[in-house]
Image: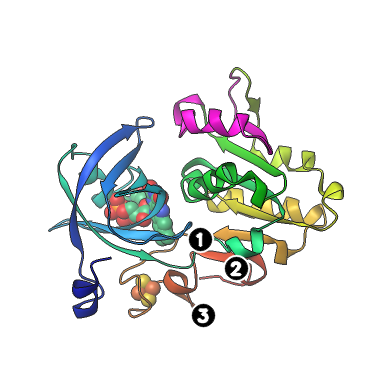
Amino acid sequence: MRKDETLLNPVKPSPYRIIDIIKENNSEWTFRMENDKLIEDGQFMQLSLPRIGEAPISVSGYGEGYCDFTIRNVGKVTKELFNLKKGDTIFMRGAYGKGWPLDRFAKKNMVVVAGGTGVAPVKTLLSKFAKNPDMYKDIYVILGFKDSEAILFKDTLDKWKKSPNFHVIYTLDNEKYSNWETGLVTKFIERIPFEEFEDNYECVVVGPPVMMKFATMKLNELNVPDEKIWVSYERNMSCGIGKCGHCRIDSTYVCIDGPVFNFAKAKHLSD
Ligand SMILES: Cc1cc2nc3c(=O)[nH]c(=O)nc-3n(C[C@H](O)[C@H](O)[C@H](O)COP(=O)(O)OP(=O)(O)OC[C@H]3O[C@@H](n4cnc5c(N)ncnc54)[C@H](O)[C@@H]3O)c2cc1C
Ligand code: FES
């Protein structure tokens, strides 16, 4: 983190260069950026372009000197980002927010259900599980995409499939595709052997609001208590540091109290 600038103005963005652009599909690209900021799994940064605007985007990967953002081209800022090329500059500030509670996940069976662009906020988490098989028990992963054109992180998905304690189900909403299932992610949640976990598990659910609603309902139906479910929420944001109230729902600030929430709290957050 560039401490001097952050102390003077905590919302001042700094310019970083694009190292690479990976075109995952037509509307979702991963921007690999130079980075010197500290990142926790599940956090987001505010990306901006002068005279255009700013958008909060989850960190989908990081390593020595770089971090990744997997961005869907949906509006004003993201459209302009899609006009950039390797070597161009994006302004960044962050990383912000509470990420995944890794201490609580240690030594547990993990169930991760994610859909579409929602796979981005769980990618660093799943990579951590894959790299540290001794620190976790079995990892059950259900990932869904609309169709084969919408698949993200193809190579990484293949690696996870081969990871020692991973049990993966990859599915497309309504397309048949080799070695993939067909159907919504909710259809496959009942394949998770919760009764074998002896209560030693936690669940992570991230995706479009409708998918999160039905996936959490299904988990509850299978007697998974809210306290064992973790979600990541997207809300309109501005400052990202708990000052402007833009992301506030009741007394909760999604930017600093989230974006990762325990579902026992998250289910009571409504606009
Ligand atoms: C914590 C957090 C993490 C996030 N992580 C990611 C991530 O990893 N990847 C990612 O792609 N996104 C992510 N988002 C979502 C992203 O920040 C939003 O999609 C953001 O609004 C994009 O900015 P924009 O200026 O391009 O879009 P905007 O111009 O703000 O448009 C946003 C939405 O409004 C709609 N819209 C725009 N103009 C109109 C109009 N005239 N009429 C009707 N509808 C309109 C668009 O279709 C779009 O759905 C995250 C959000 C949060 C809060
Ligand atoms: S975005 Fe300003 S308080 Fe959360």
Q: Are marks 2 and 3 in contact (CB under 8 Å)?
A: no
Asked if residue 55 lies in the magenta stretch, the reply is: no
Identify the residue shown where x is 78% and y is 42%. Answer: 190
The label on residue 250 is 3
Secondary structure at numbered mark 2: helix
Image position, residue 254 (x, y; %): 46, 70
Image position, residue 189 (x, y; %): 73, 43
In this rendering, the answer to whether 137 lies above or below 147 is below
Secondary structure at numbered mark 3: loop
Is residue 200 rendered to the left or right of residue 161?
right
Label 2 CA crowd tier, 10 Å (few <14, some 14–19, many 20+)? many
Q: Are marks 2 and 1 in contact (CB under 8 Å)?
A: yes
Asked if residue 156 lies in the magenta stretch, the reply is: yes
**Which residue lies under the disc numbered 1?**
233
Q: Which residues are magenta?
A: 148-177
- Respond yes or no on whether mark 1 lies under 8 Å from ligand 1: yes
Q: Name the quadrant of the N terminus.
A: bottom left
* Amino acid type shown at disc 1: Tyr
* Amino acid type shown at disc 2: Ala
- Residue 184 sits in which quadrant? top right
In this rendering, the answer to whether 104 lies above or below 123 is below
Q: Earlier in the sequence, mark 3 or mark 1?
A: 1
Residue 20 seen anywhere in this rendered image of the structure = yes
Q: Residue furthest front?
A: 134
Give the mark toward the camera: 3 or 1: 1
Identify the residue shown where x is 22% and y is 43%. Answer: 18
Image quarter where ligand 2 lies: bottom left
Q: Nearer the viewer, residue 148 or 160?
A: 160
- Residue 115 sits in which quadrant? top right
Image position, residue 150 (x, y; %): 46, 31
- Respond yes or no on whether mark 2 lies under 8 Å from ligand 1: no
**Which residue lies under the disc numbered 2?**
266
